Amino acid sequence: MHSLTYLRPASLADALAALRAHPDAKALAGGMTLIPTLKQRLAEPSHLVDLARLPELRGIAYKDDKLMIGAATRHAEVAGSSIVRGSIPALAELAGLIGDPQVRNRGTLGGSVANNDPAADCPAGILALGATLVTDRREIAADDFFQGVFATALEPDEILVRMVFPIPRRAAYAKFAQPASGYAMAGVFVAQGEGGVRVAVTGAGNGVFRWREAEAALGREFTVKALDQAALDSSEFSADLHATPEYRAQLVRVMAERAVASLAER
């Protein structure tokens, strides 16, 4: 890695001031993506601004029929939280499937979402649940937040503070993990709430996306068989040494079927 300056601000205000004072700085949460990127010299920031210990970015709470999770809350905390398990158990289950114990104990929910890796698990939960992402200056709907590979609506000096989740009637997540990395080769989060059914897919294409044809099919009949009628365009799906676009499309269907089947059994 190249030489840089490490900063550990004591408050959100201090962190924002540091990012604005150093345009080439990078925010550091768990570091599960940023540190490997630095090691490979794919990024050369002048400063690292550590957000992991900021009190404004920590914590899990249930208030006004909504679940609130601080952006610096680690995956292991989400997976083990009685509040999360009691309100949106599928979100706790998703967190427990991320990477391995080291990743879950260092990586943060906000860091994963802000990074928006196309194979990450968290964006699928955020999008399917219709969460609101609260930053230091505004609120952003999940549908407006994710903008393609490693791209989001966040400004360079904007910090994600917390995520606010409406409570679904029922939800489930199923994924086919790449054996070495644990990343999703295909992951599908299905949520049914007051506004209908939302289905989010990760790992298959150029970022998380809603499978609207599946949403429509499940809205008419919430059964595994209904998914047979849902079209799925794989023309922009990823192709690599692990899977062809067509294979990923099949994985998406199977993961969606497993998620819906698990809900039918409960």
Image (spheres, helix red, strand yellow):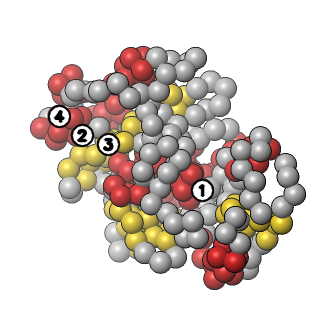
Secondary structure beneath label 3: strand
Q: Quadrant of residue 159?
A: bottom right
Tell me the residue that label 3 is attached to: 210
Tell me the residue that label 4 is attached to: 217
Label 3 vs label 4: CA separation?
A: 13 Å
Secondary structure beneath label 4: helix
| Residue closer to the observer: 172 or 202 | 202
Residue type, numbered disc 2? Arg
Disc 1 crowd, CA 10 A, few/some/many (<14, 14-19, 20+): many
Residue type, numbered disc 1? Gly
Contact between marks 1 and 4 (CB within 8 A): the answer is no
Residue type, numbered disc 4? Ala
Label 1 vs label 4: CA separation?
A: 33 Å
Residue 212: image tag: 2
Q: Quadrant of residue 215?
A: top left
Residue 157 in the figure: left or right of residue 68 = right
Q: Quadrant of residue 87?
A: bottom left
Q: Position of residue 147 (x, y in %)?
A: 42, 50
User: Between disc 2 and disc 1, whose residue precedes?
Assistant: 1
Judge whether residue 135 can be spotted in this image. Answer: yes
Query: Which residue is located at x 56 percent, y 39 percent?
Result: 97
Residue 111: image tag: 1
Disc 4 crowd, CA 10 A, few/some/many (<14, 14-19, 20+): many
Disc 3 crowd, CA 10 A, few/some/many (<14, 14-19, 20+): some
Q: Position of residue 46 (x, y in %)?
A: 77, 63
